[in-house]
Amino acid sequence: MKKIVVLTGAGISAESGLKTFRDSDGLWEGYNIEDVATPEAWRRNPALVQDFYNERRKTVLEAKPNAAHFALAKLEEKYDVTIITQNIDDLHERGGSTNVVHLHGIITRSQSDINPNLTYPIDGWEIKMGELCELGSQLRAHVVWFGEDVPMITTAAQICSTADVFILVGSSLAVYPAAGLVNYVRPDVPKYIVDPNIPYLSRQDHFIKIEDKATVGVPFLISELLN
């Protein structure tokens, strides 16, 4: 089976009603990133950060996978597919994809705030202050904040280097190190990009551009690949 590697960003989740990580005003759901998405913010005001991610989790659980998520899952009928996502939601899994790598964590799990390798499922949408990990430390959302290591980046780079086909969906390629993953795809590999606003690509080799939103462009591309 040919191996398809798909890198997805906020654009694919936006069509399920989830706000993109950083909107045009530089804010995320009305908050400065520095106030809710850094280790310093957590140390400064853990209750605020916890509440912020609890609300995001509630929104994620209420959201539904869209046509792009379902189309990517259909690819598994004929291909060996790995999805690498910058998104912290679980919409790819709920859309039927079975092999998903989360670069920035997944909001439906909690983690110890002293050992990020200790993660737990969350029952419902809320992590309460006072809920502790097995080391006795406060639980927080299992997401990678600015200033923290991206533990899956090496794995993701290795996966990209094995792709026979590469697809980029709904990413502005603005957040590093994730944006650098395209550089690990072999130059001769066919590459597709689906986005209503195609970002600047430093490597133009073999990029086939589908300038459309994910729910239109992805099902179109997947039907082509399956035929």
Image (cartoon, rainbow, N blue to C red):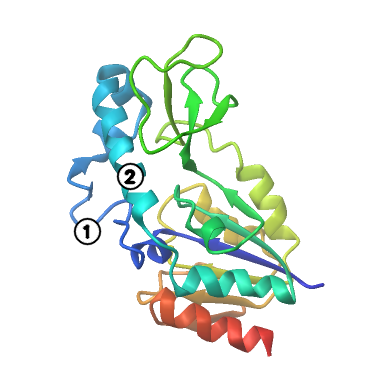
Name the residue located 49 percent from the left edge and 82 percent from the top edge.
Answer: 209
Residue 58: give its label.
2
Q: Is residue 14 above or below residue 196?
A: above
Q: Nearer the viewer, residue 101 or 91?
A: 91
Q: Residues within 10 Å of mark 1 (few under 14, many from 20)?
A: few
Q: Nearer the viewer, residue 181 or 12?
A: 12
Relative image position of residue 199 (x, y in whole percent): 40, 69
Q: Is the residue marked by circle 2 packed among few (<14), some (14-19), or many (20+) residues within 10 Å?
A: some
| The C terminus, quarter of image | bottom right
Q: Which residue is depicted at the point 18% across and 54% down? A: 25
Residue 188 visible? The answer is no
* Element on which disc 1 rests: loop
Residue at the image position 36 percent from the left and 43 percent from the top: 57
Q: Position of residue 203 (x, y in %)?
A: 56, 69
- Which residue lies under the disc numbered 1? 24
Of the pair 132 and 220, the residue shown nearer to us: 132
Is 142 situated left or right of 100 in this image? left
Residue ranking furthest to the top: 136
Q: Position of residue 146 (x, y in %)?
A: 40, 35
